[in-house]
Image: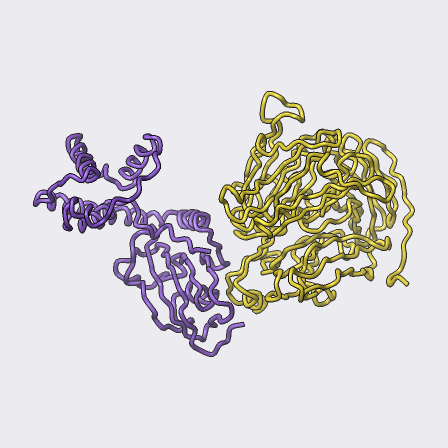
């Protein structure tokens, strides 16, 4: 069974276009690229409506509308896409770099605004519960009596950590939107005592066997609660973690 | 294997399900065995139009279109969703002439998924039997029977089923197996039990016994709120446990009028040999784990369970199919003889006239004195859980009640609510739809052990 990670896909955001687009623009021209990489086999043909739908979805989901371009600018953008398909050159000049920087700035603003709005929304009655229900359904998660949402994928049978054990874990954290990475809460092969971590992890780590992976959503009460929240992490929001249990070090109190 | 009287001839026929777990190797035909009424059976699968080559271990007989003939829903297993491996669920309409027509597509119930169970009950008490489907690979399906779907409102016309699982609040656990409808609190509304079936290894079960966190999928008991929704009462009723259930069924173990349940647990291999579990219903409020005190904790792989008074002494016995899929876990089936608990009982064998003759789906309300007032005990005719089949004869505990004030029977096809009075305790009665007088039947009983 593969672990579901749809929310870690790059997404269809402005930032994604920039991240992928910039290195390509800085790299060799299209003719060189074509020479280095033989053309991929042609895809089967789909109805033209399907191509239009993909373009529409990319544009809408990627918030390209937020850039406020006029028809002429949109046409030029599409021409650039067309040129790339036809292996024609399109110079990435200073103006293009400035446009890219402007898009980046707007993307950052947009993402910050969206995140702040989403964070503020969690203060509304029922919003947290609604979010957790939706996420459980979307990612096939279960909930414990404490409210921890989890999906543990089996590792090797056997060893489970107890509260007094130490464990070595790796985890990737994101904000509630599932897209905004939280490096300050992420770690690789870090050694911790089970009873000394966030309350949601105290419960969650004990569910895991060595080698297993888990997706956890920690409601605020099971993460930082009323304590000080780390910089850059929106207070009072649920947090998403992908955890791998690398090792159990300790008394081996597990059943 | 599940019984019915598909041709309304008064003899119970058998439908045998095959191929479960075998995925692409599981294209075995299920079999309809017609009871010839002389101690023999005839395989009529093909002539009945039920030749179905899909892996399955669960089906349910129910009269979805209210024509008095039992229809058949088969929950098939699709372990992956590639076109060549899809095994859609099937709904066969009984044509009333010994044959069936596959109406799965026209009724929109040809679901594809890793389905492990289907059960039926009229959860909203609208007179039409509904369905609940349990699967290992996702959200459950609660199909509300909304009646005729088109201009043709005859029983042969298209029928409308609507999945209301999410609105009703019965979507968990994600990986589920055995399930059943039963009115555990005797409020007249069928409640729903859905058993989880996923663990990492046996350590999850040990953790559950020890009250420690684990990632196994627990059982869920849903209380019917009587308004189309359910409330998960697993925790307050003491059944939010990791049971790893394949087979299971319910019955009144101690004749106190409250339905208890027994589950066959474990995995097909030898890595999960865990005790089967018995839960006693404590007055409709919560369930007590009486596995150890009752001697029910058999370790071998549990499969189908049936509750039945085998020796006709009034106490419900339990038959449990044991043994796994590996050679090292071959084990004989087990019959638990009930020593008795001193309570009274009544047995009812219903016979439909407009309703199907086996009376599947008929609802019973037994009213007995209770202090200065009265107490109602509810049952629905059927074979019970999704894996294991109990008799259609209803074996109803009355507690310490010494008289039966009345029995009310709701016949779903005629819509008749029939009231029968003058019944004595500790007797079996045959009751025919629309016939006021119940017929007492003498029971021949014997003592355990049989010599």
Res B248 seen here: yes
Residue at x 64%, y 23% (from the top left corner): B153
Q: Nearer the viewer, residue B103 or A216?
A: B103
> Across the whole image, how many numbered discs are drawn on residues?
0
Give left or right: position of B226 versus B283.
Answer: left
Furthest toward the bottom, the residue is A251
Res B231 seen here: no
On the rendered image, what quadrant is the C terminus of chain B found in? bottom right
- Residue A43 percent location from the top left of the image: 33, 39
Chain A's colour is purple
- Residue A81 percent location from the top left of the image: 20, 38
Q: Nearer the viewer, residue B340 or B41?
A: B41
- Residue B86 percent location from the top left of the image: 54, 43
Furthest toward the top, the residue is B151
Image position of A151 with respect to B57: above or below: below
- Residue B96 percent location from the top left of the image: 74, 29
Give left or right: position of A40 versus B58.
Answer: left
Residue B91, quarter of the rendered image: top right
Residue at x 52%, y 63% (from the top left corner): B200
Chain B's colour is yellow
Image position of B249 with respect to B323: above or below: above
Q: Nearer the viewer, residue B285 or B39?
A: B39
Residue at x 58%, y 41% (from the top left corner): B142
Q: Nearer the viewer, residue B399 or B278?
A: B278
């Amino acid at each position: 069974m593969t672990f579901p990670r749809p929310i870690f896909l790059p997404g269809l955001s402005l930032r994604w276009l920039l991240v992928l687009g910039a290195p390509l623009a800085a790299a060799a021209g299209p003719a060189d690229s074509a020479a280095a990489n033989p053309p991929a086999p042609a895809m089967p043909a789909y109805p033209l409506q399907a191509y239009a739908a993909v373009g529409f979805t990319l544009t809408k989901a990627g918030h390209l509308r937020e850039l406020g371009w006029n028809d002429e600018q949109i046409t030029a953008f599409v021409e650039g896409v067309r040129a790339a398909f036809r292996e024609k050159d399109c110079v990435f000049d200073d103006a293009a770099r400035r446009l890219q920087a402007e898009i980046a700035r707007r993307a950052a603003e947009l993402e910050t605004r969206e995140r702040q709005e989403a964070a503020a929304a969690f203060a509304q009655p029922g919003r947290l519960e609604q979010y957790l229900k939706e996420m459980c359904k979307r990612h096939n998660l279960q909930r414990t009596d404490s409210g921890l949402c989890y999906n543990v994928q089996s590792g090797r049978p056997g060893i489970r950590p107890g509260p007094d054990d130490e464990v070595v874990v790796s985890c990737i954290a994101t904000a509630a939107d599932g897209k905004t990475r939280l490096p300050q809460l992420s770690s690789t092969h870090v050694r911790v005592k089970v009873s000394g971590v966030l309350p949601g992890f105290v419960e969650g780590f004990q569910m895991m066997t060595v080698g297993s992976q888990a997706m956890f959503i920690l409601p605020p009460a099971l993460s930082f609660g009323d304590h000080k929240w780390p910089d850059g992490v929106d207070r009072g929001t649920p947090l998403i973690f992908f955890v791998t249990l690398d090792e159990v070090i300790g008394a081996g109190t597990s059943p | 294997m599940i019984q019915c009287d598909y041709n309304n001839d008064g003899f119970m026929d058998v439908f045998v399900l095959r191929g479960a777990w075998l995925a692409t190797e599981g294209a075995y035909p299920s079999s309809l065995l017609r009871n010839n009424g002389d101690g023999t059976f005839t395989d009529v699968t093909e002539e009945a139009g039920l030749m179905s080559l899909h892996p399955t271990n669960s089906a349910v007989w129910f009269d979805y279109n209210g024509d008095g003939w039992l229809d058949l829903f088969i929950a098939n297993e699709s372990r992956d969703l590639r076109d060549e491996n899809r095994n859609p669920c099937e709904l066969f309409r009984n044509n009333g002439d010994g044959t069936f027509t596959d109406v799965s597509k026209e009724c929109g119930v040809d679901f594809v998924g890793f389905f492990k169970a289907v059960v039926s009950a009229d959860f909203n008490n609208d007179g039409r039997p509904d369905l609940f489907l349990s699967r290992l690979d996702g959200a459950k399906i609660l199909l509300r029977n909304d009646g005729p779907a088109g201009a043709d409102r005859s029983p042969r016309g298209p029928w409308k089923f609507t999945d209301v699982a999410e609105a009703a609040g019965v979507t968990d656990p994600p990986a589920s197996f055995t399930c059943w409808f039963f009115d555990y609190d005797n409020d007249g509304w069928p409640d729903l039990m859905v058993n989880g079936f996923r663990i990492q290894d046996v350590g999850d079960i040990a953790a559950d016994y020890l009250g420690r966190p684990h990632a196994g999928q627990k059982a869920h008991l849903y209380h019917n709120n009587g308004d189309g929704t359910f409330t998960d009462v697993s925790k307050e009723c003491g059944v939010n446990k990791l049971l790893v259930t394949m087979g299971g069924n319910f019955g009144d173990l101690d004749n106190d009028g409250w339905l208890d349940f027994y589950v066959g647990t474990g995995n097909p291999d030898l890595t999960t040999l865990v005790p089967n579990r018995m839960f006693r219903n404590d007055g409709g409020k919560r369930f007590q784990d009486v596995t150890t005190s009752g001697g029910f904790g058999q370790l071998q792989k549990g499969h189908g369970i049936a509750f039945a008074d085998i020796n006709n002494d009034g106490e419900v016995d339990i038959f449990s199919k044991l043994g796994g899929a590996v050679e090292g876990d071959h084990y004989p089936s087990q019959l638990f003889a009930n020593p008795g608990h001193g309570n009274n009982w009544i047995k009812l064998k219903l016979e439909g006239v407009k309703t199907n003759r086996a009376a599947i789906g008929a609802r019973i309300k037994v009213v007995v004195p209770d202090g200065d007032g009265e107490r109602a005990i509810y049952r629905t005719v059927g074979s019970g859980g999704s894996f294991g089949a109990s008799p259609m004869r209803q074996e109803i505990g009355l507690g310490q009640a010494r008289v039966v004030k009345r029995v009310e029977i709701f016949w779903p096809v005629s819509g008749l609510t029939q009231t029968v009075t003058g019944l004595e305790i500790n007797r079996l009665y045959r009751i025919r739809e629309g016939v006021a007088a119940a017929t007492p039947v003498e029971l021949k009983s014997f003592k355990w052990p049989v010599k």
